[in-house]
Image: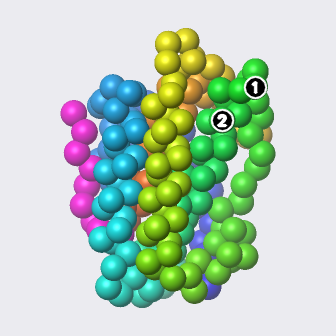
Amino acid sequence: MTITPDTKDWTWVLKRACPECGFNTQGFAVTAVPGMIMANAAAWRAALEGDARTRPEPGKWSPLEYGCHVRDVLRLYDQRLELMLSQDDPLYPNWDQDVTAVADRYAEQDPAEVAAGLRQAALAISGRFESVTGDQWQRPGRRSDGARFTVETFARYFIHDPVHHLYDVTGQRAVTT
């Protein structure tokens, strides 16, 4: 499995709509994130049916590989959100998504199991976001590269990832107001 590492700093999506997928991280109330997570997870179920193992072109992940990545992003961001809600200004552990894709053999996983795992991970993180109230939206956290977030900006930054990757698979641009 050949992977071209993504070295972009995607934090710019907090300031403007994504020109690729069309998603605008400022186009919704942050309290809508749990519902957005679940709607996205439901769309992944269909994306992982049929020929989910075939890469559309060399160097571009298959729907299965993207689905594995999104499942793992949901799990990782749930852990990071838990840190933000339970610790003062935590530094998130590093995660190399490309190493994970190879080590966990994304291309060889069972699409039905990935869809189920993605749904379970979506339930977990959407539930954790539903529990956020009041001043908790302003609790801080940070990445090792210096990027700083509040729970609110973290939620907006995070939700772009599964939305963007669904666009990578389906070609359907996001609709936000």
The circle on residue 38 is none
Instruction: Tell me, yes or no, whether the highlighted magenta stretch contains residue 176.
Output: yes
Kind of residue sitting beneath label 1: Gln
Q: Position of residue 143 (x, y in %)?
A: 71, 38
Q: Nearer the viewer, residue 84 or 92?
A: 84
Q: Is residue 76 visible?
A: yes
Mark 2, Cα crowd under 10 Å, few <14 / some 14-19 / many 20+, is some
Q: Nearer the viewer, residue 14 or 138?
A: 138
Q: Position of residue 108 (x, y in %)?
A: 57, 86
Q: Residue at x 53, y 61 (%)?
A: 71
Label 2, label 1: how many angstroms apart (C-alpha)?
A: 8 Å
Asked whether the residues under the numbered discs 2 and 1 touch, taking CB atoms below 8 Å apart as contact, a structural biologist would say no
Q: Is residue 12 visible?
A: no
Disc 1, SS: loop
The circle on residue 87 is 1
Q: Which residues are magenta?
A: 169-177
Q: Position of residue 113 (x, y in %)?
A: 50, 75
Mark 1, Cα crowd under 10 Å, few <14 / some 14-19 / many 20+, is few
Kind of residue sitting beneath label 2: Glu
The circle on residue 82 is 2
Q: Residue at x 38, y 57 (%)?
A: 41
Q: Residue at x 76, y 30 (%)?
A: 90
